[in-house]
Amino acid sequence: MFIRLLIILALMAPVCLAQDLTVQDIRQKMDAGWYEEANALLTPLARVPDADPIILYLKAKSLLYMGNFQEAERWAEKSVKAAPDSASFWTMLGTTKAFQVRNSPLKGITKCRSCKKNIEKGAQLDPANIESVRAWLTFNLYAPGIVGGNKDKARQLAEDLYAVDPVQGHLA
Protein backbone atom coordinates (compact mmCIF):
# COMPACT_ATOMS: atom_id res chain seq x y z
CA MET A 1 0.00 0.00 0.00
CA PHE A 2 2.80 2.39 0.93
CA ILE A 3 4.65 1.66 -2.33
CA ARG A 4 1.51 2.41 -4.36
CA LEU A 5 1.15 5.73 -2.57
CA LEU A 6 4.77 6.61 -3.33
CA ILE A 7 4.30 5.71 -7.01
CA ILE A 8 1.16 7.85 -7.26
CA LEU A 9 2.91 10.78 -5.56
CA ALA A 10 5.91 10.42 -7.86
CA LEU A 11 3.64 10.48 -10.92
CA MET A 12 1.67 13.46 -9.65
CA ALA A 13 4.69 15.60 -8.70
CA PRO A 14 5.35 17.05 -12.17
CA VAL A 15 1.67 17.99 -12.53
CA CYS A 16 1.63 19.75 -9.17
CA LEU A 17 4.89 21.55 -9.89
CA ALA A 18 3.74 22.62 -13.33
CA GLN A 19 0.53 24.09 -11.93
CA ASP A 20 2.49 26.23 -9.47
CA LEU A 21 4.72 27.63 -12.21
CA THR A 22 3.66 30.62 -14.23
CA VAL A 23 4.04 30.99 -17.98
CA GLN A 24 6.81 33.50 -17.24
CA ASP A 25 8.72 30.88 -15.21
CA ILE A 26 8.50 28.43 -18.11
CA ARG A 27 9.61 31.12 -20.60
CA GLN A 28 12.63 31.85 -18.38
CA LYS A 29 13.60 28.18 -18.44
CA MET A 30 13.36 28.18 -22.22
CA ASP A 31 15.37 31.41 -22.48
CA ALA A 32 18.05 29.72 -20.36
CA GLY A 33 18.13 26.80 -22.82
CA TRP A 34 16.39 24.28 -20.56
CA TYR A 35 14.01 23.06 -23.26
CA GLU A 36 13.65 19.49 -22.01
CA GLU A 37 12.75 20.68 -18.51
CA ALA A 38 10.32 23.28 -19.86
CA ASN A 39 8.76 20.65 -22.12
CA ALA A 40 8.31 18.26 -19.20
CA LEU A 41 6.55 21.00 -17.23
CA LEU A 42 4.39 21.97 -20.19
CA THR A 43 3.24 18.45 -21.06
CA PRO A 44 0.63 18.01 -18.32
CA LEU A 45 -0.60 21.58 -18.80
CA ALA A 46 -0.91 21.18 -22.58
CA ARG A 47 -2.87 17.93 -22.37
CA VAL A 48 -5.71 19.54 -20.42
CA PRO A 49 -8.87 20.07 -22.49
CA ASP A 50 -9.17 23.75 -23.43
CA ALA A 51 -5.52 24.34 -22.56
CA ASP A 52 -4.27 27.91 -22.66
CA PRO A 53 -3.09 28.68 -26.22
CA ILE A 54 0.14 30.16 -24.80
CA ILE A 55 0.90 26.79 -23.20
CA LEU A 56 0.30 25.04 -26.55
CA TYR A 57 2.57 27.56 -28.29
CA LEU A 58 5.34 27.13 -25.71
CA LYS A 59 5.02 23.35 -26.00
CA ALA A 60 5.52 23.65 -29.78
CA LYS A 61 8.46 25.99 -29.27
CA SER A 62 10.17 23.70 -26.77
CA LEU A 63 9.77 20.72 -29.11
CA LEU A 64 11.10 22.78 -32.03
CA TYR A 65 14.22 23.68 -30.05
CA MET A 66 14.62 20.04 -29.04
CA GLY A 67 14.58 19.03 -32.73
CA ASN A 68 11.25 17.22 -32.70
CA PHE A 69 9.80 19.13 -35.67
CA GLN A 70 6.78 16.95 -36.51
CA GLU A 71 5.56 16.91 -32.92
CA ALA A 72 6.19 20.66 -32.71
CA GLU A 73 4.02 21.13 -35.81
CA ARG A 74 1.20 19.18 -34.16
CA TRP A 75 1.25 21.43 -31.08
CA ALA A 76 1.64 24.58 -33.19
CA GLU A 77 -1.49 23.58 -35.13
CA LYS A 78 -3.36 23.23 -31.84
CA SER A 79 -2.24 26.69 -30.73
CA VAL A 80 -3.38 28.21 -34.05
CA LYS A 81 -6.78 26.50 -33.74
CA ALA A 82 -7.13 27.81 -30.18
CA ALA A 83 -6.13 31.40 -31.08
CA PRO A 84 -6.28 32.00 -34.85
CA ASP A 85 -5.58 35.74 -34.51
CA SER A 86 -2.09 35.32 -33.02
CA ALA A 87 0.76 36.27 -35.34
CA SER A 88 3.30 34.41 -33.20
CA PHE A 89 1.30 31.17 -33.33
CA TRP A 90 1.03 31.27 -37.14
CA THR A 91 4.74 32.05 -37.39
CA MET A 92 5.58 29.09 -35.14
CA LEU A 93 3.47 26.79 -37.31
CA GLY A 94 5.29 27.95 -40.44
CA THR A 95 8.67 27.67 -38.72
CA THR A 96 8.04 24.04 -37.72
CA LYS A 97 7.29 23.25 -41.37
CA ALA A 98 10.38 25.14 -42.55
CA PHE A 99 12.62 23.06 -40.29
CA GLN A 100 11.04 19.86 -41.59
CA VAL A 101 11.72 20.91 -45.18
CA ARG A 102 15.28 21.91 -44.31
CA ASN A 103 15.99 18.57 -42.68
CA SER A 104 14.19 16.49 -45.31
CA PRO A 105 14.03 18.12 -48.75
CA LEU A 106 11.79 15.28 -49.92
CA LYS A 107 8.93 16.95 -48.03
CA GLY A 108 9.50 19.58 -50.67
CA ILE A 109 7.19 21.92 -52.42
CA THR A 110 3.91 21.10 -50.70
CA LYS A 111 5.24 21.56 -47.17
CA CYS A 112 7.20 24.66 -48.22
CA ARG A 113 4.14 26.33 -49.73
CA SER A 114 2.21 25.61 -46.56
CA CYS A 115 5.11 27.06 -44.58
CA LYS A 116 4.95 30.21 -46.72
CA LYS A 117 1.22 30.65 -46.12
CA ASN A 118 1.61 30.27 -42.36
CA ILE A 119 4.55 32.64 -41.99
CA GLU A 120 2.99 35.20 -44.33
CA LYS A 121 -0.26 35.09 -42.35
CA GLY A 122 1.67 35.70 -39.14
CA ALA A 123 3.39 38.75 -40.63
CA GLN A 124 0.09 40.07 -42.01
CA LEU A 125 -1.78 39.65 -38.72
CA ASP A 126 0.68 41.85 -36.84
CA PRO A 127 3.19 43.84 -38.93
CA ALA A 128 4.70 45.18 -35.69
CA ASN A 129 5.54 41.65 -34.46
CA ILE A 130 9.28 41.56 -35.11
CA GLU A 131 9.51 37.76 -34.79
CA SER A 132 6.87 37.28 -37.48
CA VAL A 133 8.28 39.89 -39.85
CA ARG A 134 11.81 38.47 -39.50
CA ALA A 135 10.51 34.97 -40.24
CA TRP A 136 8.71 36.27 -43.34
CA LEU A 137 11.84 38.15 -44.40
CA THR A 138 13.99 35.04 -43.90
CA PHE A 139 11.58 32.90 -45.90
CA ASN A 140 11.64 35.35 -48.81
CA LEU A 141 15.41 35.64 -48.67
CA TYR A 142 16.26 31.92 -48.63
CA ALA A 143 13.33 30.05 -50.20
CA PRO A 144 13.58 29.28 -53.89
CA GLY A 145 11.32 31.28 -56.19
CA ILE A 146 9.40 28.15 -57.17
CA VAL A 147 7.88 27.98 -53.67
CA GLY A 148 7.42 31.72 -53.24
CA GLY A 149 10.76 33.12 -52.14
CA ASN A 150 11.41 36.66 -53.35
CA LYS A 151 14.63 38.58 -52.65
CA ASP A 152 13.06 41.92 -53.64
CA LYS A 153 10.27 41.31 -51.12
CA ALA A 154 12.93 40.45 -48.51
CA ARG A 155 14.67 43.79 -49.11
CA GLN A 156 11.36 45.63 -48.74
CA LEU A 157 10.60 43.74 -45.52
CA ALA A 158 14.04 44.68 -44.16
CA GLU A 159 13.28 48.35 -44.86
CA ASP A 160 9.86 48.03 -43.22
CA LEU A 161 11.44 46.29 -40.22
CA TYR A 162 14.00 49.09 -39.97
CA ALA A 163 11.14 51.59 -39.70
CA VAL A 164 9.63 49.64 -36.77
CA ASP A 165 12.91 48.71 -35.04
CA PRO A 166 16.14 50.16 -36.48
CA VAL A 167 18.36 47.63 -34.69
CA GLN A 168 16.42 44.60 -35.98
CA GLY A 169 16.11 46.18 -39.43
CA HIS A 170 19.86 46.71 -39.59
CA LEU A 171 20.51 43.13 -38.48
CA ALA A 172 18.15 41.84 -41.14
Image (cartoon, grey):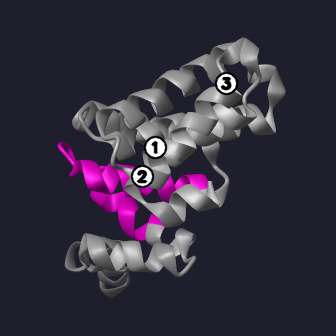
Q: Which residue is mark 2?
A: 163
In the rendered structure, which segment of residues is drawn in magenta? 39-64
The span from disc 2 to disc 1 (Cα, nearest Å) is 5 Å
Q: Which residue is mark 1?
A: 160
Disc number placed over residue 15 in the picture, else none = none
With 114 as the anchor, is 85 left or right in this view? left
**Quadrant of the snapshot with the N terminus:** bottom left
At x 32%, y 79%, the residue is 25
The span from disc 1 to disc 3 (Cα, nearest Å) is 15 Å
Decide: is 144 above or below 63: above
With 24 as the anchor, is 132 left or right in this view? right
With 47 as the anchor, is 69 left or right in this view? right
Circles 1 and 3, Cβ within 8 Å, touching? The answer is no
For label 3, count other residues whose C-alpha is less than 10 Å away and answer few (under 14), some (14-19) or many (20+): some
Q: Position of residue 116 (x, y in %)?
A: 56, 25
Disc number placed over residue 150 in the picture, else none = 3
Q: Nearer the viewer, residue 143 or 106?
A: 143
Dot 1: what SS? helix
Comparing labels 2 and 3, the label whose residue is closer to the camera: 2
At x 30%, y 80%, the residue is 9
